[in-house]
Each structure stands twice: as structure tokens, then as C-alpha cells.
Amino acid sequence: MARPVVAIVGRPNVGKSTIFNRLIGDRLAIVEDKPGITRDRIYGVSEWNGKPFSVIDTGGIEIDGDDVILKSIRMQAELAIEEADVIVFMCDAKSGVTQSDEEVAQILFRSGKPIVLAVNKVDNLARHDEIYEFYSLGFGDPIAISGSHGTGIGDLLDAIVDILPELNDDEYDEDVIRVALIGRPNVGKSSLVNAILGEERVIVSDIAGTTRDAIDTPFEKDGQRYVLIDTAGMRKRGKVYETTEKYSVMRAMRAIERADVVLIVINGEEGIIDQDKHIAGYAYEAGKASIFVVNKWDIVDKDDKTMQQFEKKIRDHFLFMTYAPIVFLSAKTKSRLHKLLPVVQHAAEQHTLRVQTHLLNDVVSDAVAINPPPTDKGRRLRINYVTQVAVKPPTIVVFVNDPELMHFSYERYLENKIRGAFDFEGTPIRIFTRRKS
Ligand code: GDP
Ligand code: GDP
């Protein structure tokens, strides 16, 4: 299910990142505490009254030049208008309505997007009167919040989920594989899109595939239908901020949410940098099938060990994504390009794989027999029953005597055994531990 995106917009120092942390706070993504994942604090997943959504803090996009602050928030607002389903426009009760608040208000107002106006730093009742002047911005009732004290956050969440749109998940038939290409600027995403579409026996179809602002490209190969998500976003170029990390992250997130399989494109010539890790981390958190595509392989100095060495580098950098296959290719010369779609198809199958409960329990019983859970302060984890409760990604619930006794390393062990028995290549697996004796 694609989660709607909520973006927080506002001047520097009004408390955006403070509120962002409050919004995702104790509802952090379940993968949060896994080692090896590089987090970037601008994106998180939240849920309120059973409605999941993702949150982006648009703050801190840096650009050079005069009027930097004004330019930056204008840019944030434009980004949020393009990429978000709901915008939280944040102001500061201490400073009152400023000229840049008014500027931003105008941009947001014209967009017609659903807006929630939040006034932060309302730390005590005495200050509550200060929110009235914010009615002048024209977004109705301002919501008084305090990031420091955590007050008003429930009201803010109520207001957000009230206007959160239902995302239409069945825009394509079940059997269409939705593919997103993500990666830093210049790694070759658009070249790869063109290469795939120009490939022999690829039939680019013109079935309606336009959702919101995103333009998707559907095509068919060897009887399998695919759609490349947000190919327009890749072609859109030229504004200064499109090269900033946050911008590419925002674009990538939206595409990731809508995809089944995410191609994480890496520049084989340059190697791996932190930004690649952030982007890959989102695909992991979103529970999407993923494939590493090492592009520009034509210009890499190679011998018979180069590929293996690069593979090792990827595995070292992306410890949390050992399940993702790696494809080396060149979008430019099309060498090895034919290897890509079969891997995509396989990953998509594994992403929707459902394993029968008795088979799963057989594998887990065997695993426990070979290597029983270690004891913790004299108590031993007992696994009573295992069942797969969902696909996309495959989600497994392990019922045990006491969830506290399930350690990360043992969970990892079980996951490896399950993967060994059923494949699941290309897809993350979620494992939840629940009490049931
Ligand atoms: P951002 O630049 O908009 O992301 O703002 P930050 O979240 O970094 O906050 C800017 C400053 O305001 C920090 O010093 C925060 O501690 C402070 N701050 C955030 N929320 C509140 C609040 O509710 N009340 C008060 N008094 N200060 C706050
Ligand atoms: P994007 O920003 O990720 O969409 O990257 P582009 O597709 O625009 O490619 C950036 C640059 O890399 C362009 O100059 C491409 O011609 C070049 N490029 C893309 N793929 C390859 C490749 O496989 N080999 C080589 N040598 N250059 C490539």
C-alpha cells in the first residue's frame, strides 16, 4: 500500500525538525533498530488512528545566493507542492507572522493542496492568544503546538489524517510490475530508462498510466507487463536544487512508495557514497523488492576480479540488504542489459511469495532443532508457531513465550533459514515476534 506523503514546510528555526521527530517519534519504522542502516533524519514513517503516512522535513535545503532564507523556503514550498499529499505549514508563535510566512502562504494557497497550519512554540496557556494573528494567513484554524512540551501533537495528527487522501493502489492490474529507478543525479537513470525501452522486443504501450503529477511508462517484454514509475521526474531538470540530496530523496521516496521493485542505480565508475546508502535505506524501510544496478560498467577498468570486488563493496556498505541481487551493466552500450528484466521479474515474484504455514513451521522447527535459542538469564525462548500474514513484503509472525527473549541475531538466523528454504531473493522479509504460549 502506498503511503501518502506529508511534508513539513516553514522558515528555519520554527521547530520543523523537532516536530518531525515528534511525529515519527515512538512510531519509528520497525526496522529502525537494525544495525547497519544509515538513517537520514528527513524521512520517516508515522501512523495515527490506523492511517499510515510518511513524513518529510523539507528544512535545511541549502542554496547559495542572496535572500537565501526566502529562496530556501520558497523552494521547500515548491517541492512540497510537487511531492506531498498534505503540507504542514509551520510558523512560530514567538516571532508572530513574518513577511516570509506570508510569502510562503501565498505560494501554498495557490497550489490548492491540503494544508494544515501549525503554530509551534505555544509552550504555555499565556501564549495561546498569540495564535490568533495566524488566522490572517488564510488557512483556517491554526493548530497550537509545542515541540518542547509535546502538547498539541495529537491535534496536529488529527488534522493531518482528516485530510489525508486515500491513495489509489489499483491504478494498474495486479500482474503489472511497477519498477522505480532511484539513485543520485548522473548515475544514469534516464539513460537506463531509454535503454530498457529501446531494447529489442520491448513494446511500449500507451495504456493510461498517469497518476497525479507522475508520468509512468508502461511496456511489455516476453509476455510480462511492467511500468516504469515517474519517468517524467527523471527528465525534469535544470533547477539548481535538483542536484541537492534532499531533492533527489524527495523524488525518490514518492517513486519508491508507488513501486513493487526498486532499482538502486549506482555509478560503477565512482563507487558508493553515503547518499547511495540513504536512498537504498528508504527502499528497505518501505519494504520494497530491490536490485542494485551498477551502471557505466563499460568505462570501469576491469579484470576478472573487478566484479567480485565491487560486489563485496556493495555487501559491506549495505549490510541490511543482503537479499538484493546485483546487476552490472551499461546503459550506454547496452552490454548485459538483457540480464536486468529477468531479475526484476524474479524479485517481483518473491515479493508476493506466500509460504504455506505448515511448510514454514517445518523449516523453523528444523532450525530450532539444529540451533536452539540461547538462554537469557536462565530463560529460554520458546517458539510455538510461525505464520506468514502478508506479502509485499512477505511478513512473518513468530509466536513465542516471551518476545523479549528474541534477539536480533537469532531472528537473523531464522530469516536465513527461511530464505534458504524458500528463496525470497530480492525482497526484504519482515519478522514480528508476538507473545502466545
Ligand atoms: P527547524 O529549523 O524549523 O527545523 O527548527 P528546529 O526544530 O531545529 O528548532 C529550532 C529551535 O527551536 C531549537 O532550538 C528548538 O529547541 C526550538 N524549539 C522547537 N520547538 C520548540 C517549542 O515548542 N518551544 C520552544 N520554546 N522552542 C522550541
Ligand atoms: P541520471 O541523472 O541518473 O538520469 O543520469 P543520466 O542518464 O542523465 O546520465 C548521466 C550521464 O552519464 C550522461 O552523460 C550519460 O550519457 C552518462 N551515462 C549514462 N549511462 C552510462 C553508461 O552506461 N556508460 C557511460 N559511459 N556513460 C553513461
Image (tube, rainbow, N blue to C red):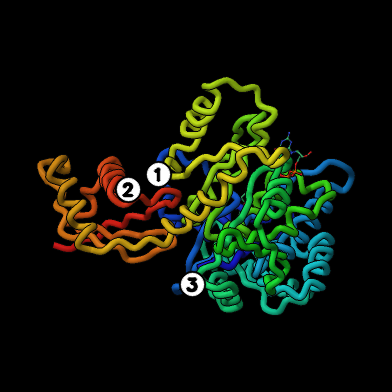
Q: Is residue 101 left or right of residue 410?
A: right
Residue found 79% across the figure and 51% down from its top: 72
Residue 301 coordinates in the image, percent (x, y): 65, 22
Label 1 or label 2, whichever lies nearer to me, is 2
Residue found 42% across the figure and 51% down from its top: 428
Q: Is label 2 within 8 A of ligand 2 (CB to nearest ligand atom)? A: no
Residue found 14% across the figure and 52% down from its top: 382
Residue position for label 2: 419
Residue furthest to the right: 66
Residue 308 coordinates in the image, percent (x, y): 49, 27
Residues at discs 3 and 2 in contact (Cβ within 8 Å): no
Residue position for label 1: 34
Q: Which quadrant does ligand 2 occupy?
A: top right
Instruction: Using the image as rendered, state which of residue 236 and residue 72 is in the foreground.
Output: 236
- Label 2 is placed on what type of residue? Arg
Res 130 label: none
Q: Earlier in the sequence, mark 1 or mark 2?
A: 1
Residue found 26% across the figure and 45% down from its top: 417
Classify mark 3: residues with Cα within 10 Å, few (<14), some (14-19) or many (20+). few
- Label 1 is placed on what type of residue? Lys
- When the figure is inspected, residue 339 is found, relative to residue 159, above or below; the finding is above
- Label 3 is placed on what type of residue? Lys
- When the figure is inspected, residue 196 is found, relative to residue 371, above or below; the finding is below
Classify mark 1: residues with Cα within 10 Å, few (<14), some (14-19) or many (20+). few
Residue 434 coordinates in the image, percent (x, y): 25, 60
Residue position for label 3: 51
Describe the element under mark 1 as helix, strand or loop: loop
Instruction: Using the image as rendered, state which of residue 145 and residue 264 is in the foreground.
Output: 264
Describe the element under mark 2 as helix, strand or loop: helix
Find the distance from the CA under tag 1 to the CA under tag 2.
18 Å
Describe the element under mark 3 as helix, strand or loop: strand
